[in-house]
Amino acid sequence: MKTNFFLLLSLSILFTSCRNRLGEGPVERAGRGVDNAVNWVGYGVRRTGEGIQLATR
């Protein structure tokens, strides 16, 4: 019973210490970078499509 208590206590301390209190961690920053890259690619595809449409007129 004591072993379970100490295991639970140590895990709870570990999990609470891993939280980033400054806002975002490396995974969120990487995800935001991927989102920005995908948005820029979409913007480029749209501009290219508009250019092709203008060229065919």
Image (cartoon, grey):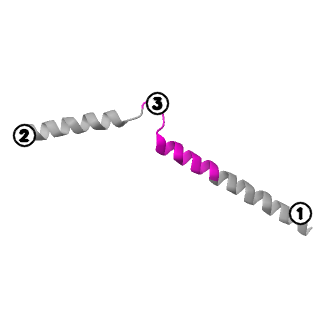
Can you say which quadrant of the picture contains the N terminus? top left
Mark 1: secondary structure: helix
Earlier residue among tags 1 and 3 = 3
Q: Are marks 1 and 3 in contact (CB under 8 Å)?
A: no
Mark closer to the observer (2, 3): 3
Residue type at numbered disc 3: Leu
Quick one: label 2, few (<14), some, or many (20+) residues within 10 Å? Answer: few
Is 53 rendered above or below residue 8?
Answer: below
Mark 3: secondary structure: loop
Residue type at numbered disc 1: Leu
Disc sitting over residue 54 in the figure: 1
> Which span of residues is magenta-colored?
21-37
* Left or right side of 23 for 13: left
Which residue corresponds to the image point at 53% horizontal and 42% vertical from the top-left? 29
Residue 24 colored in magenta in the image: yes
Earlier residue among tags 1 and 2 = 2
Quick one: label 3, few (<14), some, or many (20+) residues within 10 Å? Answer: few
Is 32 rendered above or below residue 44?
Answer: above
Is 39 rendered above or below residue 14?
Answer: below
Mark closer to the observer (1, 3): 3
Mark 2: secondary structure: loop
Residue at mark 3: 22
* Left or right side of 4 for 57: right
Callout count: 3
Residue type at numbered disc 2: Met
Q: CA distance from mark 2 to mark 3?
A: 36 Å
Disc sitting over residue 1 in the figure: 2
